Amino acid sequence: MADDPPSSRPPLRRGPRTLIAALLVLGVMVPSLIIRELIEARMGSGPLADFGWTAVPAAATAWLAPRVSYRRRDALLWLVGPGLYIFAVIAWRLAFLPYRDWTPRPDEASRLRWLHDPEHAGMLVPARGSQVGGPMCRGACPTGRRSATA
């Protein structure tokens, strides 16, 4: 009756999850600030330096967002302000994978299953044979969308 846990490790508690999320944010923000300083030293302060520092975090957001129920286009929020907040939420969710404690998007709900055992009750994991978090489904998706390669 009980489902198998999705991995051999139990879900992380708040302390280790916070540490991993903070390291992910720092691992993205420090290189972007270094890039900003390099651009500023080479070309002076200006719009290129102001927007240049968002390249690394926007790319990281676009790459990691589908794995945690965000869309790639959310990386564009780095250009208008709330990008750091969105990336912090993405890092928080990444630190908890393969377990999920957030509501899935409607297009990925059919590819997830609930865990029912007492230790992991209420958590979502990818259903066997599905690939949740990819940019698009391989072949035909439950939503009818098709990937460019299929």
Image (cartoon, rainbow, N blue to C red):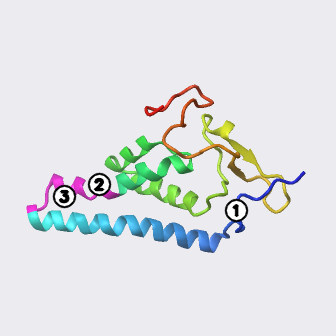
Residue type marked 2: Ala
Q: Residue at x 52, y 66 (%)?
A: 21
Judge from the rendering whether residue 106 lies leftward or rightward of residue 66; answer left or right.
Answer: right
| Residue 55 - label | 2
Say what secondary structure mark 2 lies in. helix
Q: Which residues are magenta?
A: 43-56
Q: Residue furthest front?
A: 150
Relative height, residue 34 to residue 55 (above, below): below
**In this view of the protein, which residue sits in the foreground, 65 or 137?**
137
**Percent coordinates x, y for residue 65 in the rendering:** 48, 49
Disc nearest the viewer among 3 and 1: 1
Judge from the rendering whether residue 29 lies leftward or rightward of residue 51; answer left or right.
Answer: right
**In this view of the protein, which residue sits in the foreground, 45 or 144?**
144
**Percent coordinates x, y for residue 22 in the rendering:** 49, 69
Disc nearest the viewer among 2 and 3: 2
Q: CA distance from mark 2 to mark 3?
A: 10 Å
Quickly name the residue at label 3: 49
Graded by Cα atoms within 10 Å as few (under 14), some (14 to 19) or many (20 or more), the crowding at tag 3 reads many
**In this view of the protein, which residue sits in the foreground, 58 or 134?**
134
Residue type marked 1: Ser
Residue type marked 3: Ala
Graded by Cα atoms within 10 Å as few (under 14), some (14 to 19) or many (20 or more), the crowding at tag 2 reads some
Q: Residue at x 36, y 52 (%)?
A: 59
Quickly name the residue at label 1: 7
Q: Residue at x 79, y 57 (%)?
A: 4
